[in-house]
Amino acid sequence: MIDPVWLIVLVIGLGTFFWRGAFLVFGGHLTLPNVVRRGLNYVPPAAFAALVLPGLVQFDGATGSVDEARLLAGLVAGLVAWRSRSTLWTLAAGMGVLWLLRALL
């Protein structure tokens, strides 16, 4: 006999899989209004900002101060990404500045 908790996890997992998969199967037949399409253009930058920004403004220990090295490295990486549009240069610049500031401070 399967444990009821695992049965619930399995059912929820399958439900999620089929719910998301339905858009892949039937999504080609859907037509979205232009206002929705324009709004969906902002989803990737918003999701990326929600993932990245908390790491940049992470508080440093018990002092409650912002980690300036991490924040400055993130700003430099953002500037490099904006100007170069290169993931490799963005990572190299951000990590280089972070390591340099960590070594100096």
Image: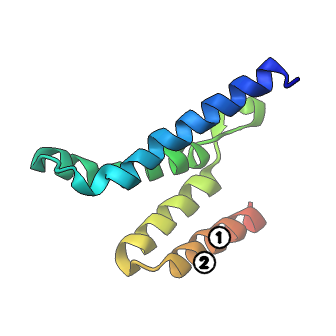
State the mark number for residue 17. Answer: none
Q: Residue at x 53, y 51 (%)?
A: 52
Name the spot of residue 88 as percent of width and height, x first. 55, 80
Which residue is nearer to you in this view: 103 or 56?
Answer: 56
Name the spot of residue 48 as percent of width and height, x first. 46, 52
Scheme by which the image is coloured: rainbow
Q: Residue furthest front?
A: 1
Tags 1 and 2 touching, CB below 8 Å: yes
**Disc 1 element:** helix
Name the spot of residue 42 as percent of width and height, x first. 29, 51
Which residue is nearer to you in this view: 50 or 10?
Answer: 10
Question: Is 53 placed above or below 99 here?
Answer: above
The picture quadrant where one finds residue 100 is bottom right
Q: Residue at x 50, y 42 (%)?
A: 18
Q: Residue furthest top?
A: 4
State the mark number for residue 95. Answer: 1
- The amino acid sitting under disc 1 is Met
Name the spot of residue 98 as percent of width and height, x first. 66, 65
Q: Which residue is mark 2?
A: 92
